[in-house]
Image: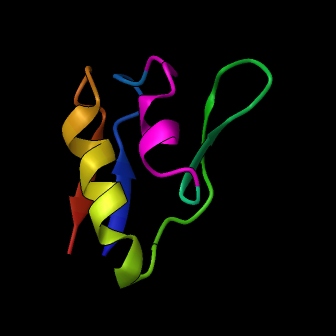
Amino acid sequence: MKVKVHWHLCEGNGICVADAPDVFDLDDDDNLLVLQEEPSEDQREPVEAAVRNCPKRALELQD
């Protein structure tokens, strides 16, 4: 699986960080950092939650 970010939609609100902290983080300026562009299968559930909970629909999961 691969994480795709639609950067023009991302607000850096950090909900994805709360859902999947091993995959997402925010820098000091609240810009999204993708720590794992291709997370392992054991990260699927938290990454799916991050995609589902993103208020701007800025995240996509590709298989």
Residue 9 position (above or below residue 52): above
Residue located at (25% from left, 21% from top): 55
The reply, left or right, for residue 27 in relation to residue 22 is right
- Residue 8's place in the image compared with 43, above or below, is above
Q: x%, y% of residue 53?
A: 25, 33
Quarter of the image for residue 19 reads: top left
In the image, which residues are magenta? 11-21
Q: Name the residue rendered at 48%, 19% in the picture.
A: 13
Q: Is residue 47 above or below residue 27?
A: below
Residue depicted at x 80% and y 23%: 28
Please state the horizontal and vertical placement of residue 62, each as a whole percent of the image: 22, 66
User: From the viewer's perspective, is residue 34 above or below residue 13?
Assistant: below
Residue 12 painted magenta: yes
Give left or right: position of 3 versus 33. left
Judge left or right: residue 12 versus residue 55: right
Mark count:
0
Q: Residue furthest bottom?
A: 41
Q: Quadrant of the C terminus?
A: bottom left
Instruction: Assign the N terminus to one quadrant of the image.
Output: bottom left
In the image, what residue occupies the spot 56% across and 65% down? 36
Relative image position of residue 24 (x, y in whole percent): 55, 48
Q: How is the image coloured?
A: rainbow
Q: Is residue 2 shown in magenta? A: no
